[in-house]
Amino acid sequence: GSEKSVQINYAKLPQEVSVGDPIFIDDGRIRLKVVRVSPTEIETQVVGGGRLRGGRGMNVPESALSIPAVSERDIEYLDFGLAHGVDWVALSFVRSTEEIEKARAYCAAQGKRPKLMAKIERREALVRLDEIVRAADGVMVARGDLGVEIPVEQVPMAQKRIIALANRMGKPVITATQMLESMVEHSWPTRAEVADVANAILDGTDAVMLSQETSIGEYPLEAVGTMDRVAREVEDRVGTVHTPEEFGESGEGVSEAVVHGAAHIAGEVQAKLIVAVTRTGQTAQRLSAARPNLPIVAVVSDEEVGRHLVICRGVVPLKIGCLEGLDQTPEVIFDLICSAGLAGPGERVVLTGGIPSGRPGSTSFVRVFRIPDSFRKGK
């Protein structure tokens, strides 16, 4: 490229834009307007200029591009990730459930079953939001591209809508992009950025994500520390258990009622934490969606299931050799959580799961225990 021209890697673009269309580069930092189109070139007027680095993203919000959501290059990256055992795969520019199912089928054909996260960053995704959230294992509020695809003033309410729907369906949700962007170059965030992180947590997000702050920023450790402190401060002061109507779409009625009951009981008895005995991770994920203001320990026998759960708000996975019979032998649970330093003698814990223990899709019991004095925290 030069001062007057750049090359792009999508050859069909001249055939798919029209004079007058806006083109945004690098999350809208550079704004162009199409003034002339030829078979191989697009001439634009610079509406908002800036420094253009290589590898920046491009958005054409008023054109229906035929570019696939998963490109050949994406497949190469996906193959690499699958070969190295990735737990989650984030799908960019998802427009429909078909793209999610194609990616799931491709992974299954390779003998892999990673969780799939749909990045919500297209207008079409907002139109089909319900079906996309239902089809995916989790969603990401990708505010960079989303803020170019729709008017920037609409992004806050879109964020709230996406998070609320994910909460209601029991799907983990990440809020991302420009959360602490000033910390790319400065060691301290702006007040507005701190409020942004806090408000995402208050909206109900499971996770907040840093991008440039840690990938190319000068203060990555400070950025992580700042986000951690803000999250802890907000969660220490606010805690709400959602009602069944607010999060009841993720599974069967009995299981949902038991999970909500466990979250409510834990608050009433001032429990230290909730323990979910789970084979598939669903019990812990449903508990997380209920948003109890205390940790959720997911006792799993499959390490992969535990890694999948790390993204869910408040969930701490602990691996054990066998799940069977844990509802009848709580001493094993006491030893596990005390050894991990998560609870100690005299503290109450709420135990939930299915009977028999670990049976998939059968969350059916809640028990309250006081840890005996014979157990020691962090032993």
Image (cartoon, helix red, strand yellow):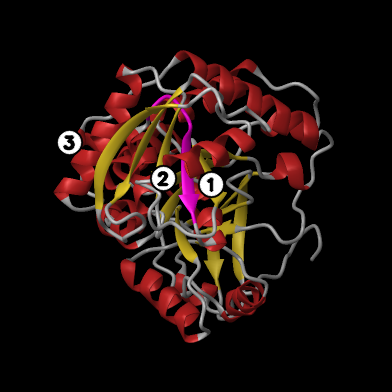
- The residue indicated by pointer 1 is 317
The earlier-in-sequence mark between 1 and 3 is 3
**Disc number lying in front (2 or 3):** 2
Q: Residue at x 48, y 48 (%)?
A: 299
Vertical comparison of 46 with 1: above or below: above
State the image coordinates of residue 359 (x, y, percent, origin top left).
Answer: 31, 60
Q: CA distance from mark 1 to mark 2?
A: 19 Å
Question: Which residue is denoted by mark 3 in the rendering?
Answer: 245
- Badge 2: few (under 14), some or many (20 or more) residues near its Cα, within 10 Å? few
**Earlier residue among tags 2 and 3:** 3
Q: Quadrant of the N terminus?
A: bottom right
Q: Find disc 2 in the rendering and name its residue.
A: 329
Label 1, residues with CA under 10 Å away: few <14, some 14-19, many ≥20 = many
Q: Report the side of 337 relative to 279 (left or right).
A: right
> Which range is magenta?
292-300
Residue at the extreme top of the image, as rendered:
237
Q: Residue at x 55, y 27 (%)?
A: 343
